[in-house]
């Protein structure tokens, strides 16, 4: 069996996979590979599956499988799996770091010092303590964010039509009710037909003036023109994002270079520890298949 590692995984992974067959990182061998490992960089579209003639299984190292055309995979008889457990802590820590960066004005203070300005009197911080966090989606990552927020003394609310109750958040039945109550809103939903563009001007209008939005979910869940207008008008206080409509976003993406936007180049899953955990989950998947489970 040939295993193709198409994207960047932990350096020790090829060695760990040798017990299952031959391992290559040469994308030129796509046509021969039975198993293909991708992260977010490879776009596994129809043309990809046309080329992957021997492929039986594609594993997305990470959570979101929106870079894989599931219909095309199904048509070619390719099973699509991911490693859903590994990344939760890594992404939650980044979402929380972005949430801390805004009220602590970290970027602004740092940049001012780079310019030789010591803004001790000018910069006033605010606290997360006793503020309300509204989580959109209460899956694995959001639950990790919720626990951290509780430790900071925040009230944690969540909206998720597919989850009735949560041990770490008080559920709110309607999305507009959630955002109306929140000082901070954090997005943790997959990209689906339902969530694409869900964060738009109609929803933003329901929010508290000056609320902060954190996005470590998917870039296409927000309508960037609407977020920009709300940042310009002051309806939104800040938008901190790790995610983009594409990696990297197009040069004319409306939120690039906005002073109220904090930008991270899709690093949510990119901790050393997480790359190792993703590798462990990949090995678990292949071991189970080898064992006939
Ligand atoms: P998960 O499947 O555990 O949780 C997703 C939750 O979203 C589920 O509880 C689901 O019911 C809920 N949901 C689905 N549709 C919804 C809707 N319309 N409104 C509200 N809730 C809805 O997934 P997870 O591990 O928590 O990951 C969440 C998302 O984070 C992924 O799908 C991916 O898009 C994103 N992600 C980003 C990075 C990154 O690098 N920034 C890394 C991993 C995952």
Image (cartoon, rainbow, N blue to C red):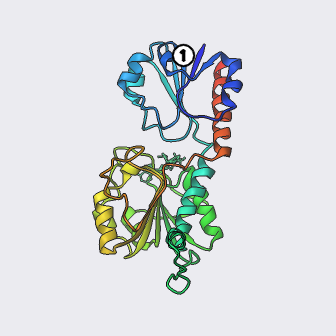
Residue reaching furthest to the front: 116
Q: Compared to 45, does 162 lie above or below?
A: below
Nearest the viewer among 6 and 202 is 6
Q: Mark 1 packing: few (<14 Cα in 10 Å), some, or many (20+)?
A: some
Q: Compared to 280, does 102 lie above or below?
A: below
Position of residue 130 measured from the top left corner of the image (x, y, whole percent) = 57, 78
Whether residue 104 sits left or right of residue 293 in the image: it is: left
Q: Mark 1 points at which residue?
A: 34
Residue under the point 41% across and 21% down: 49
Element class at badge 1: loop
User: Where's the N terminus, which quadrant?
Assistant: top right
Residue under the point 55% across and 39% down: 62
Figure quadrant of residue 248: top left
Count the numbered circles shown. Answer: 1
Position of residue 180 measured from the top left corner of the image (x, y, whole percent) = 39, 72
Figure quadrant of residue 286: top right
Position of residue 132 measured from the top left corner of the image (x, y, whole percent) = 51, 73
Residue under the point 61% across and 51% down: 90
Nearest the viewer among 221 and 30 is 30
Whether residue 6 sits left or right of residue 192 in the image: it is: right
User: Where's the C terminus, which quadrant?
Assistant: top right
Question: Disc 1, ligand 1: is the CB inside 8 Å?
Answer: no
Q: Is residue 292 visible?
A: no
Q: Is residue 150 visible?
A: yes
Nearest the viewer among 149 and 245 is 245
Q: Compared to 32, does 169 lie above or below?
A: below
Residue under the point 60% across and 45% down: 87
């Amino acid at each position: 069996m040939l295993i193709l590692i198409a994207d960047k995984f932990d350096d020790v992974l090829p060695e760990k996979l040798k017990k299952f067959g031959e391992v290559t990182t040469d994308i030129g061998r796509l046509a021969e590979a039975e198993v293909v490992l991708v992260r977010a960089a490879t776009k596994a579209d129809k043309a990809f599956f046309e080329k992957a003639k021997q492929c039986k299984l594609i594993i997305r190292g990470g959570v979101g499988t929106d870079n894989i055309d599931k219909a095309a995979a199904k048509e070619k008889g390719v099973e699509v799996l991911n490693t859903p457990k590994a990344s939760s802590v890594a992404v939650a820590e980044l979402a929380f770091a972005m949430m801390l960066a805004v009220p602590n004005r970290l970027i602004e203070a740092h940049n001012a010092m780079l310019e030789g300005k010591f803004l001790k009197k000018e910069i006033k911080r605010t606290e997360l303590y006793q503020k309300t966090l509204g989580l959109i989606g209460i899956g694995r990552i959001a639950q990790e964010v919720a626990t951290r927020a509780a430790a900071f003394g925040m009230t944690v609310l969540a909206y998720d039509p597919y989850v009735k109750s949560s041990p770490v958040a008080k559920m709110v039945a309607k999305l507009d009710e959630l955002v109306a109550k929140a000082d901070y809103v954090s997005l943790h939903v997959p990209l689906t037909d339902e969530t694409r563009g869900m964060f738009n001007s109609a929803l933003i209008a329901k929010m508290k003036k000056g609320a902060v939005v954190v996005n470590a979910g998917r870039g296409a869940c927000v309508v960037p023109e609407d977020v920009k207008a709300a940042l310009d008008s002051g309806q939104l206080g800040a938008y901190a994002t790790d995610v983009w409509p594409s990696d990297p976003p197009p040069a004319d993406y409306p939120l690039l270079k906005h002073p109220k936007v904090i930008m991270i180049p899709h690093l949510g899953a990119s901790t050393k520890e997480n790359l190792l955990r993703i590798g462990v989950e990949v090995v678990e998947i292949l071991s189970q298949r080898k064992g006939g489970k």
